[in-house]
Amino acid sequence: MLKAVVVVLVVAELVLLTAFRLAPAQATTSDSLVYTWGFVRPGNQHLVCKRITIHPEKEVVSQTSHHKLVKMSSKSTIVEDRYCSHLTKPSL
């Protein structure tokens, strides 16, 4: 279970880094979608395909630097296994 959580966090981090690095200045960022294998809930051994939607909520200008910080939210939804068919399913 810990492996799956780590995989989900790494994938989400890569998506966020890629989205912000490739977005032109002053551009709006659309929602990012990631498909990954995950557990239904913590402590459950049943693997399902999940769609994780990452959505920028608001920009905050930092007082100490000239960078804009973006608050992100994510939503996880269980979808059909065919969406994750291109991904290697973790072994339990």
Image: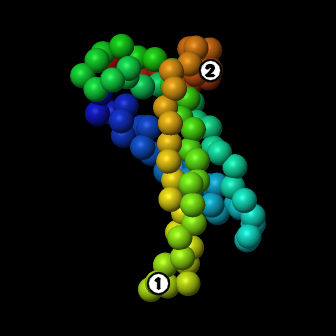
The three-letter amino acid code for the residue at tag 2 is Tyr
Per the image, the residue denoted by label 1 is: 63
Q: Residue at x 75, y 64 (%)?
A: 27
Which of the labelled discs sits on residue 83, or is there none?
2
Q: Is residue 2 above or below residue 26?
A: above
Question: Based on the displayed image, in which of its 4 quarters is residue 39 positioned?
Answer: top left
Few, some or many C-alpha atoms within 10 Å of disc 1 (few <14, some 14-19, many ≥20)? Answer: few
Question: Based on the displayed image, in which of its 4 quarters is residue 67 positioned?
Answer: bottom right
- Label 2 and label 1: CA atoms lie apart by 42 Å
The three-letter amino acid code for the residue at tag 1 is Gln
Q: Residue at x 62, y 14 (%)?
A: 82
Quadrant of the image for the N terminus?
top left
Few, some or many C-alpha atoms within 10 Å of disc 2 (few <14, some 14-19, many ≥20)? Answer: some
Quadrant of the image for the C terminus?
top left
* Side of 42 where 57 appears, left or right: right
Q: Residue at x 49, y 78 (%)?
A: 62
Query: Residue 33 in the image: x percent, y percent?
Result: 62, 38
Query: Residue 36 in the image: x percent, y percent?
Result: 51, 29
Q: Is residue 11 visible?
A: no
Q: Is residue 92 visible?
A: yes
Query: Residue 17 in the image: x percent, y percent?
Result: 56, 57
Tags 2 and 1 touching, CB below 8 Å: no
In depth, the one of 26 and 88 nearer the eye is 26
